[in-house]
Amino acid sequence: MTQSWVKLVTDTNSQTVTSDSAKAADTLVAACLAAASNGDANALFDLGVAFSTGSHGITCDMIEAHKWFNLAAVGGHEEAALCRSDIADEMTAREIAEAQRRAREWLRAGRAAA
């Protein structure tokens, strides 16, 4: 299995979301999803970071962040497990359950495609 690395770099020059940053967010998510579908735990972690911080024009979404950190942790990414735990402290039980449901769907969809 070939793994690629997608590194997120914070853009501190822009405080507003423009159509260019929305395109960049779409491109970033697409690149991470492509790498993640090949089993790249780093890409899964990067998605968790992007959704937990709201960086790169991506809307902050703790349910999505938990989902991606959870999937990265399952893939062996140790820091992802710590991040998942940190954000879970600020989430409701219902939000965590939803994040876990979404993670299971992602895993099922991956098995169905294989």
Image (cartoon, rainbow, N blue to C red):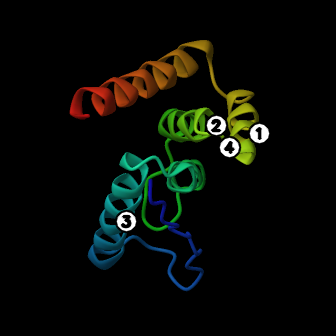
Q: Amino acid at mark 4?
A: Ala
Identified at 50% across, 52% down, the residue is 40
Q: Amino acid at mark 2?
A: Ala
Q: Amino acid at mark 3?
A: Ala
Give the label on residue 101, or none.
none
Q: Secondary structure at mark 2?
A: helix
Q: How many marks?
A: 4
Give the label on residue 73, or none.
2
Earlier in the chain: of badge 3 and badge 4, it is 3
Give the label on residue 25, or none.
3
Pick out the residue farthest to the left. 113
Circle 4 packing at 10 Å, graded few (<14), some (14-19), many (20+), is many
Q: Amino acid at mark 1?
A: Leu
Identified at 42% across, 65% down, the residue is 57
Write down the residue under mark 1: 82
Circle 1 packing at 10 Å, graded few (<14), some (14-19), many (20+), is some
Identified at 39% across, 50% down, the residue is 38
